[in-house]
Image: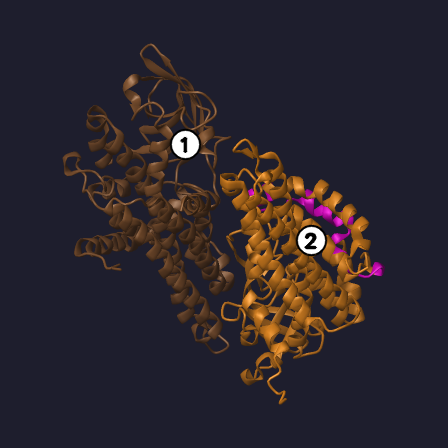
Chain colours: A orange, B brown
Amino acid sequence: MLDYSSYDEFREEIRAKADEIVAPHAAAIDAEDHIPDGVMKAVAQEGWFGATAPEAYGGLAWDTVRYSIMVEEVSRASGSVGVMLAVQGSLIVYPLQKYGTPEQVEHYMPGFASGEVLGSFALTEPGAGSDAGNTKTTAVLDGEEWVINGQKCFITNTKRDWPGICFATVRTDPDPSAGVRGVSSLVVPAETPGFNYGRKENKMGLHGSDTSEIFFEDCRVPKDSVLGELNEGFKLFMVALDAGRISIGAMAVGLGQAALDLAIKHAETRHQFGKPLGVQQAIQWKIAEMATKVRAARFLVYSAAARKDAGLPYTTEAAMAKYYAAEVGRLVASDAVQIHGGLGYDKSYPLERIYRDVKLDEIGEGTSEIQKIVIGRNLINLKRKT
Amino acid sequence: MDFNLNDEQKMMRQVAAEIADEQLAPRAEEMEENREIPADLLAFLAEQGYFGLFLPEAYGGVELDPVTYALTMEEFSRGSPAVALVVSVQNALVGLPILKYGTEEQKEKYLARAASGELFGAFALSEDEAGSDAASVQLRAEKKNGGYVLTGHKKYITNAGFAGLFLVVARTGPEPGAKGLSCFLVERDAPGFALGERFEGMGMRALDVRRLEFENCEVPAEALLGAEGEGLKIALASLDLSRIGVAGQAVGIGQQAFNEARRYAGEREQFGRPIIKFQGIQFYLAEMATRLEAARLLMLRAAARAQAGEPFSAEAAMAKLYASETANFCANLGVQIHGGYGYMRDYVVERFYRDARVTEIYEGTSEIQKLIIAGSILKG
């Protein structure tokens, strides 16, 4: 059924679990800027790190719609845990499954699926944010090894107290005119000598989801560490980012839903002028606008996910889902803050955290501006004559 | 219609801009981290006359007009919105109401000390159950032994941590309703008065915002500001003016977010050119600049009416409503133009994004501003 109500039971199970194992820790994760081992293990126990991984490697083999619902519901409890699972599922498990050799899948998938290993996707560099073709980090073949040198920044899932493996986008074709056609994705375990985490970023929100610089200094990995075809890293990261956009959209829907739920509860229970806030038409209309936007954003996310599952092109739809859901998430969080007045700005209440967390969704994995470029270019065909 | 500033206003704006750029902006991050406005900075501002903006020279004030006040708020807020708010509260919500409604004794006792920065004041209206619905204040003031005894609490009170004087709205008459409310000047060391826990907010973290507790807090009869039953009138009239200041603050936040974004867009290269060469970024800047101009004109118009002695409640409400939305609009696009850097604490726009949000909430939420504006429309 087109309204996705057939997933209701599934959603309720995930929501109940997320409320039980994630939500109670969300405030502390934000305040301490750390996801504790207990939460990591509880999430791993549910299999959510490997939601989309094949069952043979310990995954749950969920389709993208189910995976999106999981990211949404976990994000509703904690954006920090939600984004960690979004990265693991879309930027790590998915490209490994799609582009990995049987040996690579065999070797790496069980760790990612079980959550024993956290994957990070290192694309962005100080001079290559929205412009990924400008990658400066290089990998030079020296006998049977790649030697990597360079710097990455804003890399998520760089959790220092957890085993990590990085998928690094590096320039493997020394000819600079090759542009994005000269980059490849290399699999680099975090314990490799020459792989060093730099500064951990102090972000506006999503505390506990660690974001760091990564420095490669003569970092050597075996020749067979290339994920996918040599010099076709562009294709890999574009495909991974398409998938990633669905999950960032799902994350934004979850955060928006969390804000909406709080706003509705507040409208029902807070009295001013001798009656509940919810009696006021201004509040009713605001709630109506918020709920409509969240529902529309959710359907955009599921629609992109369903297209991916059906093997249809979904680049435009994923960009729309991320762009719209992230904007809706911000607007709805802002409206919820407004309905709460001073309480919405108060750190002793979850809303200001949601407001800070959801802002990332308009920035990470391609800013909203990049999404608009993707959508616009896909819709406008300048070669069409009539 | 003349929106030109006179020479004194231009000069005062320039002075405030220099203070913002040289004294406030370089220390804003330190103030945020330490959650404190340094004493030497407050002393400097006092010396420059910023705590006696509306007060006559007799009290050590500089007696400036509302337009200059608004411009000062705007410029200061480019450097530090928190410092601007401290200045605004001291002038519009403490100094001015005492000047307008106080007895000679009250003025003598407090105003010179307020202007010199020796005494800071706080304005205490909100309570747990009295937010937007200010008339439902529950804090009681009972007559006793020729004075009053205050019992209850206040919430979200700015400057409370270092204030020596609190302008407190309390109920002397029957509940509910505005007519039973009166204003009191309560000193920090009044028996039965206590500071509650400090508020932790998303932004404006240098501000010292607290809960206040009153437990059989005894104040003399002379603590009453204005007449009994005038409390809400005094509070709301003071807020009318301070909203012009908050509008100025919001314009300043938006302007600085714009300035940062403009500069960054000129420096940051992507796809082989500075991002300001992209039409999308140019149009973002165009939208920001347009809204800032409109917000500033609304602010100036409200201030000009206040200066001319004309009614300005609705104009101040419009200015605050629109300017606070504009601040958030600009802060959001400012972050967006910075991309990933905009989400990082190292960049000023990240702080402005969090600071901007409260301008739509405090000193009357946007909803309250709309009620005021709608009220004036319905009155015709």
Q: Amino acid at mark 2?
A: Glu
Instruction: Determine the residue positioned at 61% across, 62% down.
Output: A324
Q: How many marks?
A: 2
The quarter of the rendered structure image containing the N terminus of chain B is bottom left
In the rendered image, residue B85 lying in the magenta stretch gets the answer no
Would residue B309 appear left or right of A158 to someone viewing this image? left
Decide: few, some or many residues near mark 1? Use Cα within 10 Å; few <14, some 14-19, many ≥20. Answer: many
Residue B125 is tagged as: 1
Image height of A345 relative to B294, above or below: above
Image height of B298 relative to A240, above or below: above
Our reading of the magenta stretch's main secondary structure is helix
**For the view shown, which residue lies furthest in the bottom direction?**
A385
Decide: few, some or many residues near mark 2? Use Cα within 10 Å; few <14, some 14-19, many ≥20. Answer: many
Q: Quadrant of residue B182?
A: top left
In the rendered image, residue A45 lying in the magenta stretch gets the answer yes
Give the residue number, with chain letter if any, for mark 2: A72
Q: Secondary structure at mark 1?
A: loop
Residue B132 placement (x, y as % from top left): 47, 37
